[in-house]
Image (cartoon, grey):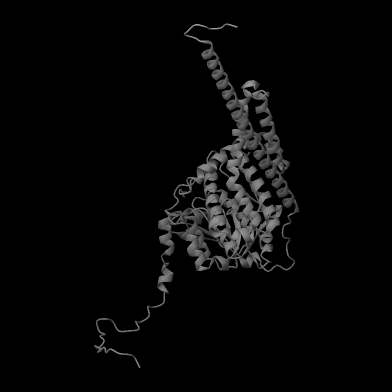
């Protein structure tokens, strides 16, 4: 061993320096080991938490499937209380109905409703009256409102309805011939106030675009969800506005009409869309039951945007869902006691984007660790093995989730990768929608009126109401100019 004995490097100082260096190396090694242990434990906790979340979600999905299979639609009664020819008015708010309206209207008339009311803005009266005349001028009436506003149009239709049941329908909703009888069957239960149906996508062209297939996937999943929730606790998150029936007496309530046309988010952003969410919450908060007929006899067809504008539709629906679910869960609170399973599904939707995005973040972390040597804390699996395993897992689980749809349309299996990508895009969109709830525009239709102007129009009495308004009662006392009280002398003391 080399020994330094000069005055400049004495042996004792060298040994002290060597001892300190060894101590520093030992301390750094301890810190490195401690840091790696903490990191590995945190990583293990995150992986375990995500595993539990995935197990929990797929367990509930199996429960949902079982409940959907156990669900039964309401059969037709032998002696129905309600008959379409006498008790049903169909209200259709629209501003730009085209040729697809004729096909839809013919399908409605097969059910023999008493009347169909088309509610539009004044400048569209001519074109829609021509469409109505071409279909059935005797049973279709066209009414107008000053502004194109769906809630104003719906409230105008409610005021002009004279039957016991109102059915709201989109102008492109195509019904099977048996839809109305099966919907009316649910109203045999006098506690039921609103009824919905299952849905499928009707392609705009000869075949479905990828956007329409994505919409069809969503509707298939929704049909399972609403049938399961109806079977479990009798509720559902939303009676879809594409077609839904209600008892007229509920909707003619002045309190409902005022709240429906004066609906504000956070007290200052007036809402035009989200009418079906409002109607569903009103049923729950006022003690009315709901039901959904998920069967082929009541399954309607509806068109979707066949291009990228479908994403704008989804954004509007997502904002409406955020607003309505937050109100139901944390502002009104009735859903917790009346439909606890529906409340659970709402909470699940709130946290879903966070749990969904956690998956690719963790995979990216594992891939990064797989590129490092094992001695430096890396994983022994190659990065490509991790990615392939994750993609196979996604394909298998998402395909299994879509099996009810693929059973009827196996050719759509080629769009499963697009559905996976859409799922992650949708998670990001949900977060974006959460921070833009103040935006209340329609998004996919031009010419929608200003909600404030629409509210003013709704509050203004119609000419008929002004004409038959009761006269102002005479004042109880004479006018101030002609009535003077004589002065009274005040005295002090106790009253006897």
Nearer the observer, 208 or 97: 208
| Vertical comparison of 150 with 37: above or below | below
x and y percentages locating residue 118 in the rendered image: 52, 58
Name the residue located 63 percent from the left edge and 29 percent from the top edge. 366
x and y percentages locating residue 331 in the rendered image: 53, 58
Rendered image quadrant of residue 479: bottom left
Task: Using the rendered image of the protein, determine whether residue 143 is visible from the camera's viewpoint.
Answer: no
| Vertical comparison of 238 with 14: above or below | below
Tell me the quadrant of the picture where the N terminus can be found. top right
Task: Using the rendered image of the protein, determine whether residue 80 is visible from the camera's viewpoint.
Answer: yes
Task: State left or right for residue 262 relative to residue 298.
Answer: left
Total marks shown come to 0
x and y percentages locating residue 423 in the rendered image: 60, 39
Nearer the observer, 178 or 234: 234
Nearer the observer, 241 or 361: 361
Name the residue located 34 percent from the left edge and 82 percent from the top edge. 475
Tell me the quadrant of the picture where the C terminus can be found. bottom left
| Vertical comparison of 424 with 450: above or below | above
Task: State left or right for residue 310 relative to residue 121.
Answer: right
x and y percentages locating residue 180 in the rendered image: 66, 60
């Amino acid at each position: 061993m080399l020994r330094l004995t000069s005055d400049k490097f004495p042996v004792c100082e060298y040994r002290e320096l060597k001892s300190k260096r060894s101590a520093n190396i030992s301390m750094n090694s301890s810190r490195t080991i401690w840091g790696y242990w903490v990191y590995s434990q945190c990583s293990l906790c995150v992986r375990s938490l995500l595993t539990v979340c995935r197990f929990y979600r797929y367990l509930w999905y199996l429960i949902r499937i079982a409940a959907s299979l156990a669900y039964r639609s309401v059969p037709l009664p032998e002696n129905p209380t309600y008959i379409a020819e006498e008790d049903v008015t169909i209200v259709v708010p629209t501003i730009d109905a085209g040729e697809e309206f004729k096909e839809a209207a013919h399908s409605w008339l097969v059910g023999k409703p008493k009347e169909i009311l088309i509610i539009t803005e004044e400048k569209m009266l001519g074109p829609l009256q021509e469409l109505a005349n071409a279909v059935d001028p005797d049973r279709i009436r066209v009414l107008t409102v000053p502004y194109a506003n769906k809630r104003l149009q719906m409230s105008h239709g409610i005021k002009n309805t004279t039957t016991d049941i109102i059915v709201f329908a989109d102008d492109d909703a195509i019904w099977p011939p048996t839809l109305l009888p099966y919907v009316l069957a649910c109203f045999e239960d006098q506690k039921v106030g609103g009824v919905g149906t299952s849905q499928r996508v009707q392609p705009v062209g000869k075949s479905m675009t990828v956007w329409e297939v994505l919409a069809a996937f969503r509707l298939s999943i929704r049909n399972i969800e609403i049938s399961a929730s109806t079977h479990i606790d009798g509720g559902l998150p939303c009676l879809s506005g594409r077609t839904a029936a209600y008892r007229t007496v509920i909707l003619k309530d002045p309190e409902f009409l005022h709240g429906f046309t004066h609906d504000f988010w956070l007290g200052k952003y007036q809402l035009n869309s989200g009418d079906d969410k409002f109607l569903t919450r009103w049923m729950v908060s006022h003690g009315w039951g709901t039901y959904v007929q998920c069967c082929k006899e009541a399954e309607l067809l509806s068109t979707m945007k066949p291009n990228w504008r479908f994403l704008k539709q989804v954004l509007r629906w997502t904002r409406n869902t955020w607003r309505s679910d937050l109100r139901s869960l944390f502002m009104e609170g009735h859903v917790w006691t009346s439909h606890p399973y529906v409340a659970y599904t709402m909470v699940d939707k709130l946290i879903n984007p966070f749990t969904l995005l956690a998956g690719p973040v963790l995979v990216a972390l594992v891939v990064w660790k797989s590129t490092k040597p094992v001695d430096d804390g890396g994983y022994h699996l190659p990065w490509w093995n991790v990615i392939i395993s994750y993609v196979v897992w996604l394909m298998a689980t998402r395909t299994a989730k879509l099996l009810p749809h693929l059973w009827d349309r196996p050719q759509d299996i080629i769009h499963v990768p697009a559905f996976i990508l859409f799922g992650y895009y949708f998670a990001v969109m949900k977060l974006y929608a959460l921070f833009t709830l103040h935006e209340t525009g329609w998004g996919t239709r031009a010419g929608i009126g200003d909600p404030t102007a629409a509210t003013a129009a709704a509050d203004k009495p119609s000419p008929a109401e002004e004409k038959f308004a009761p006269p102002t009662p005479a004042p109880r006392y004479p006018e101030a100019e002609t009535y003077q009280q004589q002065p009274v002398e005040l005295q002090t003391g106790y009253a006897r």
